[in-house]
Amino acid sequence: MKRANRMASLLGLVGVALTLVLLAPATPSAAENEFVGVKDCGKCHKKEKEGNQLGIWEKSKHSEAFKNLGTPKAKERAAKVGVTTEPQKSTACLVCHTTGHDEPAARFDKDFKKEDGVQCEACHGAGGGYKKKKTMEQITEERKKNKGVSSTAKETGLIIPDENTCKTCHAEQITYKGQVYKNPSYEPFDYKKMWEKIKHPVP
């Protein structure tokens, strides 16, 4: 009888543990992180002593990427590669001229604006997992100690962009969800030269 009672108690504890596991909120993977938008990133990345990454972005062509799709020149270029809709509404253009194009609405913070063009998260990955100051400080410390490598960055979805990241869009053509799109404004891409224009290191 005692043995049966112990077994029942044990099974009850296992049941409670399983219930708690199933009810606990799942930690989102990096692929599910929320896009927070450039203004959220800029809250911490706008001071001169920290590198003023926001200011550098604001002066770049990346910040004008969506806006430029509304110009007559953009429509003319788009037509040359077969885009028959408005460039600001065409996946062929939006995949590189906005951030997080075609992702589910649930992945975007309420203040996110696609009109802000190629934002921080287009290159660094959706920021919902790494945006907290404490997380960013931990990533910075790890990178200092490990020659630029951070396990926390990987876990939380922060991408440290490189030449291949840039060439995702700065290419003659891109493949998105199995569809090939030609880049009507492509020019040979000199990574080192262009990086000098956009680099924004944290001191």
Image: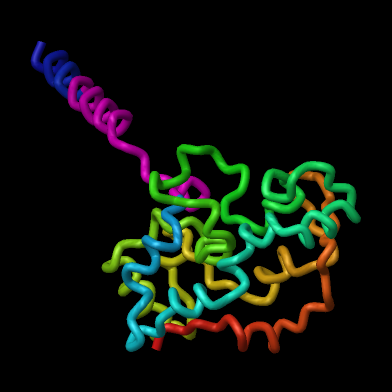
Magenta highlight on residue 14: yes
Q: Please report the residue visible at 32 percent of the width from the left and 66 percent of the height from the top.
A: 135
The kind of secondary structure the magenta stretch mainly shows is helix
Q: Please report the residue visible at 83 percent of the width from the left and 47 percent of the height from the top.
A: 83
Residue 133: quadrant of the picture: bottom left
Q: Position of residue 46 (x, y in %)?
A: 36, 76
Residue 173: quadrant of the picture: bottom right
Q: Residue furthest top?
A: 1
Position above or below: 22 against 103: above
User: Residue 84 versus residue 72: which sits nearer the camera?
Assistant: 72
Magenta highlight on residue 28: yes
Q: Position of residue 198 (x, y in %)?
A: 58, 81
Q: Position of residue 36 (x, y in %)?
A: 42, 54
The segment highlighted magenta reads 11-34
Q: Please report the residue visible at 39 percent of the width from the left and 89 percent of the height from the top.
A: 203
For the N terminus, the quadrant is top left
Position above or below: 56 against 115: below
